[in-house]
Amino acid sequence: MSANLRLMDSDGGAAPAAPYRLLVVGVGGGGCRAARHVATLLDQGPTVVAVDSDDQALRETGLPVQLSIGRALTRGFGAGGDAAIGKIAAEDEENKLRNLVEGMDLVFVITTLGGGTGSGAAPVVARIAHEQGALTICFASTPFDFEANRDKDAAQEALRQLRMHSDATICMPNQRLLEIVPDQATLKSAFDASDHMISMAVIGIWKLLTETGLIRLNFSDLKNLVENSGGACSFGYAEGSGPDKAKQATQALLASPLLDHGNVIAQADAFLLNILGGPDLALLDVQQVMSNIQKVARRDAKIFMGATIDDDWQGRLTVTVLAAEHWVAAKPMIGQPSAAPAEAPAAVPAAVPATPEQAASAAAATAELAQKELIFEKRDRGRFDKVEPTLHGGEDLDVPTFHRRGVKILSDRT
């Protein structure tokens, strides 16, 4: 067994059969901590992997699947807060990372941005997973406002890279934790709350795809939402218990700072909502949740909804939401077949042979129709180079939206 990569199931036996091949990858110290939380809450869940350049922190996760990266560069002592080192560390182990995600249908990449390994390595992991054909969803927390500007700058660049290389990236600003945890909460309890929320997002999707449901969603529903989200999604999670658990969960969800106190739901073009409950989950509970959500949501919003049952959730109910602010429906490129192709133009009669000159002219005309991706050069900020960026919700508003979300701009060549 390699010292750098250890692969086994949590109980040492075979993993349970699942209809979809899912992998959870925690990258860096914070990402590995959140991944460990997922593994703790899901005894029979997907494989959970810890990826880090700090061997001691890696061992402390206790996860049976571990990958140490960049040992030739860091000697197992971590990236020292340098995202460039974290990036090189991941690229040095690209073959192992590729083997890790090979054959997966869905890969969750969990990371904490601002540090060296998380900021540098997580985009590399996301890129490799996406290149291998996996639906790639990233959960990334960003630094508190009081943290160093260097960390915040590294986090913003890493967030941009994640959005470029994944199907969807869910940004969870740590600053919003201040609205969730009590005023006198310790720093550890604040980070524990962040880990728990990320874990519940992963668990909600896992349960949605694998557990018995009153109302079933499948992998294609999740894929449809994520791939048409424009690269950015928002996440919300709330719980309720007791006789009025549905009302509690809905009210907490719509008050969540992660969903901008309900504004994300009100403005979203589309969202996926999963209700997780115990054997006592009633259709009335589902109806109450959906009725309250629909009062807030737009009438034309696309809603993907599921309700799943887990014996361990007796007397409790959880509502998990993935919301896409924009629905960017994929459009077929010129020259490619569409879902409902228009009537084909009349063909040139076969009896009329084409001369070499005519063939060349036709080829040139066809090439003129091909769309090209506009490439924008990266420019400095000029006189504003030393001015603090305009940050809101973990995003740099000075960077154009299509750059922040990794949206490709296509243009007809003229």
Image (cartoon, rainbow, N blue to C red):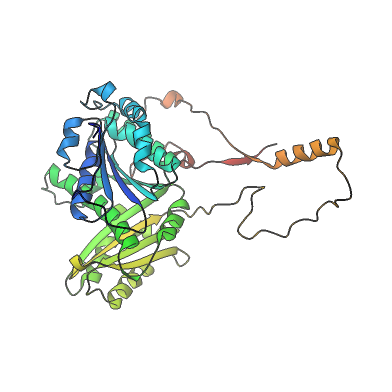
Q: What residue is rendered at 21% in x and 30% in y?
A: 54
Q: Quadrant of residue 412?
A: top right
- In the picture provided, is 329 more to the left or to the right than 163? right
Q: Residue 20 at x, y = what percent?
A: 37, 56
| Nearer to me, 120 or 46 | 46
Q: Residue 297 at x, y = what percent?
A: 40, 65
Q: What residue is rendered at 86% in x and 52% in y?
A: 349
Q: Quadrant of residue 411?
A: top right
Vertical side of 77 occupied by 326: above or below? below
Instruction: Give the quadrant of the N terminus.
Output: top left
Q: Is residue 83 visible?
A: yes
Q: Is residue 391 visible?
A: no
- In the picture provided, is 354 more to the left or to the right than 10? right
Vertical side of 89 occupied by 320: above or below? below
| Nearer to me, 221 or 354 | 354
Q: Residue 137 at x, y = what percent?
A: 37, 48
Instruction: Give the quadrant of the C terminus.
Output: top right
